[in-house]
Image (cartoon, rainbow, N blue to C red):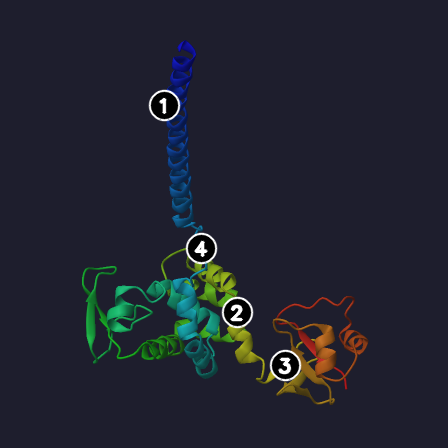
Amino acid sequence: MKLRYLIVLIAVLAMSCGPKKGIVTKKEESRTNKTVAVKEREESNKTVEKPTVVTETKAPSSVDVYIDLYAEIAKSKMRSHKIPASITLAQGILESGSGSGRLAVKANNHFGIKCHGWSGDKIYHDDDRSQECFRKYPKAEMSYEDHSEFLTGRSRYADLFKLDEDDYKGWAKGLRAAGYATDRKYPEKLISLIERYKLYEYDEEVLKPSVKTSKRKSTTIIEGVKKNNTKNHVVSKGDTLYSLSRLYKTSVEAIKAENNLKSNDLTIGQKLIIPN
């Protein structure tokens, strides 16, 4: 009898303990699986942010823009009035604030030309004295024309036109000496602008096809062709002896011999005689 009660008790204990442990295990496993699944979905939904790559570009300065706008006008005035384009451009840059000054913006007056003898439109602006009268132009090119006429029409600037047309340093110093500007550093400012922005290259572009005289042999050059049937070439940016030999169908050694060159180095503005 006791044995029977013992067997029943063991059976009851087995039924009450076994299933409960199984159910707890399943719940824990289910909870763990759900947590892992949620974390995986969260990770997959995250957007990977890539760093923005910014490429810096150099914006053109106001001086560069000014040169692009007015270089051709300065060159045309050099052809007609024999004033170096480099000087005209440098003066325009300096006196108009690269085209941003009030007189340039409101009156197309790039050189501070005053109203003396002027019957056209006017603008008043503080200068040496308060509210001085300045000329007002419909377009900037007229300001360039008046500037050229101003220099060619006054005797005090006559000595400047005895200089070589590409002698921008002589012109810069001569303008100050003739009383064009009171600023003692005016020549240095012009020269600095010309050399920094290579404005002398515009002088070379104007002079290259013109009638020149070779100081080395005193032989007249007309459109780049000499009387002795050889050719004249003014070195420009990018020229090399090899490229010139290909251009004129000759040899490097022939060019060096004709010009007494000891090396292959060339400088911008250098005059070469090209043999046939």
Q: Earlier in the sequence, mark 2 or mark 1?
A: 1
- Which amino acid, by three-letter code, is at mark 3? Thr
| Residue at 73% from the left image edge and 73% from the top image edge | 241
Q: CA distance from mark 2 to mark 3?
A: 19 Å
Query: How far across and down, in percent of the image, does residue 102 sit?
Result: 26, 65
Q: CA distance from mark 3 to mark 4?
A: 54 Å
Q: Which residue is mark 1?
A: 16
Question: Marks 3 and 4: which is nearer the front?
Answer: 4
| Residue at 41% from the left image edge and 62% from the top image edge | 61
Does residue 245 appear anywhere in the picture? yes
Given contact means CB atoms under 8 Å apart, are the residues at marks 2 and 1 in contact? no
Residue 107 lies in what quarter of the image?
bottom left
Given contact means CB atoms under 8 Å apart, are the residues at marks 3 and 4 in contact? no
Q: Earlier in the sequence, mark 3 or mark 1?
A: 1
Q: Which residue is mark 2?
A: 200
Query: How far across and down, in percent of the image, does residue 142 sit?
Result: 32, 79
